[in-house]
Amino acid sequence: MKLLNIDLINKSYNYKNLSKKSLIKGGRALIAEVLKESNVANAYPLGPENKLIICNGALAGTGVSCSDRLSIGAKSPLTGGIKESNSGGDCARSLAKLNLRGIILNNKISDKDWYILKVDQDKIEFVIANEYLGLGNFEFKSRIERKYSDNYNLISIGPAGENLYLNSAIATTDVEGRPSRMAARGGLGAVMASKKIKGILINKNGNSEIKGSKSKGFMKVRKEFHKIIQENERKEVLKLYGTASTVMDVQNIGALPVRNFSAGRYEHADNISGERIYDIIKERGGEGKNSHACMRGCMIQCSNVYPDEKGEEIVSPLEYETIGLIGSNLDISDPDIIAQINYLCNDFGLDTIETGGALGVMVEAGLFDFGETDKFIEAIKDVPEGGWLGRLIGMGTGIAGKFLNVRRVPVVKNQCISAYDPRGVKGTGVTYVTNPMGADHTSGLTVFLPIDHHSKADQISASYNAQIGRTAYDSLGLCVFLMSATAAHPNKVIKMLEELYDISLSEEFLNELGRKVLIDEFMFNESAGIPKDDYNMPDFFSKEKLAPNDLIWDFTETELDKFFSKLKY
Amino acid sequence: MKLLNIDLINKSYNYKNLSKKSLIKGGRALIAEVLKESNVANAYPLGPENKLIICNGALAGTGVSCSDRLSIGAKSPLTGGIKESNSGGDCARSLAKLNLRGIILNNKISDKDWYILKVDQDKIEFVIANEYLGLGNFEFKSRIERKYSDNYNLISIGPAGENLYLNSAIATTDVEGRPSRMAARGGLGAVMASKKIKGILINKNGNSEIKGSKSKGFMKVRKEFHKIIQENERKEVLKLYGTASTVMDVQNIGALPVRNFSAGRYEHADNISGERIYDIIKERGGEGKNSHACMRGCMIQCSNVYPDEKGEEIVSPLEYETIGLIGSNLDISDPDIIAQINYLCNDFGLDTIETGGALGVMVEAGLFDFGETDKFIEAIKDVPEGGWLGRLIGMGTGIAGKFLNVRRVPVVKNQCISAYDPRGVKGTGVTYVTNPMGADHTSGLTVFLPIDHHSKADQISASYNAQIGRTAYDSLGLCVFLMSATAAHPNKVIKMLEELYDISLSEEFLNELGRKVLIDEFMFNESAGIPKDDYNMPDFFSKEKLAPNDLIWDFTETELDKFFSKLKY
């Protein structure tokens, strides 16, 4: 396994062989280490000093279900702190097959052209990309396919990234080649654009194998791991209804984002529920799929393909966070519309959470009303044009709120809160304010734990454990949707790593990994000027009671400090 | 002397008699104390919990030259911290003649109307102001004069404040009734607007006298104080050329703001110098005046009246900060244009510093070019309209920079840097980052000290002394332009206070006062979530060398911490 280091300023590159000790270091751990050890903390996020790191985890390409997450990281132009955002799809696997743990983009292209990086086995090529500028991710992918046939996965940016908008995702292709698996959060698309890279082609047909992956020992424990997944009940829910199944769970808790986080239950929740979406997909048939694997060999298959009335695909996947932020948060109760907006966001390279948050704030400022679907779509279509409305969406919820002088702006570290109102799912609220990434459910979601989400009791522990667990999984390329099945079996993950790389790890390896990476990330943020205890929950969450349960955000700083006592940092 | 406390929610008010001990507490000291002792630190600055405090100083109305500054303060919606902004004019004196140290506006109007507060001797009246909404300060003042003859001074907001823009000043009238003495900084106009108060009328004809002001002892020391002013050399420069005399001083130091702080010397500085402005005023004659007193009895008279070619007044005054930020910073070298823009800013209620800074950032983003006067004026005229360009100016330099994704944004605590590049006048740079108000030269200007402004040596002391001195003066209603004459004679100020109020003060009273108020302000900011050591100088000042002297901003945090060692806080 190697690390591909590219210096964009002179278009040179080299491969660094990973030592045995470094082989298990991937994903979020690798990103934290590279960023912490460079001078990136003080860099301007859209300047040449920032690095864009794209990598897989230690189990990528070994046939372990849900182990092919692709992590992308940099200093975030949105939060000003460290950012790792990961996506499913086929890119992480294809990198592994090229014997690559990851790619680090250093500096920036200094000539007048934009480029595509073409990554093949043991070599890369710089291809001028000017002809693709301004294209959405889908048309870009089609043209790439026309030129290179089906031989490459694609990591790409759309117009939002090209415009250097802080609400800009990086798209990666799924197994069928859709550029719809998004490293959505933190404005990483703008970082890629600042380096003048429109796309990265990853050859799908690499032939490298990790030696241990064919060993009997590895295959045995992989089988055991798969059996655990197979027997998990939650897996069945995810397979049938996808992540949209979460809508009614959070509705029942009373913590859906409704009309810019002004209520916790949505009167039309049934219309946008996982069950309803399942029914629509089944009724319409055609290209629709209620279950779909974004990564090869995935046993959970929580992705879906949402079709229109003619059975033609509108978007894949249609997921919970999008339904929350674009749906209930904007009072859009028609899944067809949510799906159309989702497709536009994927095509332009926008984070759907940040987009829904920004539109909510724009409504709050009086630019339009909740539910004004046509106006929302018009505003989103202004993103590639770079008009005022497009820029409000493009700069994200926090800056839109500041510019429009809105008080109720649902952001932490300038990043929009995910689809769990922190008053109603308090442990996830603790995650929003204590984790190094800003408001991000993927950093430590607590909503599926069997605890009272309305009470403060035990929420610090719940968030702490979720953060440690997720950080470890994100560092190994493992999908979070495994966790309900496999989180209780860290020994299986450890054993797979030991067999694969012929190493020996402590029983506490996952906890130690999660803790170390979090501390690295907090250290990065501190160097970047963001104190770890900068708990900046917007004040309206403390002042407005959330209907119907009359909840407020009521954690004190002293209470939140306990997170860091637990972390021993 | 009394404090008038108004509760806007039920339109009630009361007078609080000031104890002997409290009589000398005015201006910035009173504002710091009232804000610190209330719950305002955690308040939303544009919500009812914020307080707007308008007050004079202990010597107001006693015939002491330059002692009638009017201080206005609140939690700033621009910086999020404490703000005191003071102006000359006739309001402070007329308050004193009504036996008032100040007025505190609590809560906000809760009915559908906007109001004017009419303040007379021992009573106030609420007058519905809806008919004046949308008016600029000048037309508003004319209509008030038509209705109430010449019996009132006016404290008012223009459209910028009404739009709740964070770049919004409060205008106060000068001796001739122009609403052009601006409490410009920190967005106080928006605070007044949030309370739905369009204007405050202060009866000019109060008959209260401070008992001691007629005493022989007081008159003797006042005479001595005036003699010191009379004999001061710098006073002569200010009287002839006004604050515009500073242009060539700062040009020579190499620290003028030129094209969004990208150079320190301006090739057309001669055209906008105090000497040139003097010549123009003298040549044109008519209403023009090279010297003008904004406060009654002022011996310095650094104000002016700038006329057009026909001799008709364009604006009064035309001052250094405006010339720097609107002139050299935007590459406008025609004083007529600067004067026209200055008038527009006064009329709309905009801070000229924040306006010039925002326009500079808009140029940096490519909206127009430097020197494109017509486009700048068009954009400023969009402020009352509430259009996109108007909003960029209206929300100020920092938010315009964020929204437009500009890297070179010259703000500290979200407030635009004044017309002294911190690389070239390092002591003033120290003031920008260490004082509680954000980038504000009035908090502690060092440019006239006989030190090497390019060297770091002694700048912490220089800034510390300037901050202490200015804070004390701002707390007594004394004009900063006195300082070159009277700063070396604190005993005269102390003696005047002792004679006036029959009290005894320590020799160190001014230093103790300055220090206490600064500490109160830092405590307020800390409660508001702004640490005292949040030294956030924009990074381009550290990375780009300032021509022609190749200077950078190179203070370390450890060096800046010495400010707080000196303050013993």
Image (tube, coloured by chain):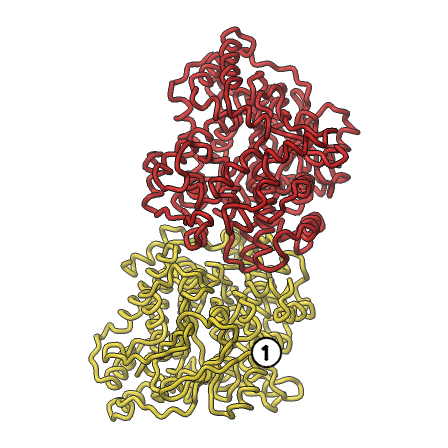
Chain colours: A yellow, B red
Lateral position of residue B461 relative to residue B99, left or right: left
Tell me what residue is drawn at x 53 percent, y 53 percent.
Answer: A540
Q: Amino acid at mark 1?
A: Leu
Nearer to the camera, A411 or A164: A164
Which residue is at the far top?
B216
Name the spot of residue B548 as percent of width and height, x first.
46, 48
User: Can you say which quadrant of the picture contains the N terminus of chain A?
Assistant: bottom left
Q: Is residue A165 above or below residue A197?
A: above
Lateral position of residue A505 relative to residue B343, left or right: left
Tell me what residue is drawn at x 37 percent, y 54 percent.
Answer: A531
The residue carrying pointer 1 sits among few (fewer than 14), some (14 to 19) or many (20 or more) residues within 10 Å by Cα, namely some
Tell me what residue is drawn at x 60 percent, y 55 percent.
Answer: B362
Which residue is at the far right?
B146
Q: Which residue corresponds to mark 1? A: A135
Q: Is residue A39 above or below residue B378?
A: below
Q: State which quadrant residue B491 falls in.
A: top left
Task: Count how many numbered circles sit on residues in the image.
Answer: 1
Tell me what residue is drawn at x 59 percent, y 83 percent.
Answer: A139
Q: Is residue A304 above or below residue A520?
A: below
* Residue A106 visible at all: yes
Name the spot of residue B361 as percent of width and height, x first.
57, 54
* Residue A256 visible at all: no
Lateral position of residue B155 relative to residue B417, left or right: right
Lateral position of residue B237 relative to residue B338, left or right: left
Name the spot of residue A399 as percent of width and height, x first.
55, 58
Q: Secondary structure at mark 1?
A: loop
Task: Name the chain under label 1.
Answer: A
Name the spot of residue B221 as percent of width and height, x first.
49, 12
User: Can you say which quadrant of the picture contains the C terminus of chain A?
Assistant: bottom left
Q: Is residue B84 above or below residue B263?
A: above
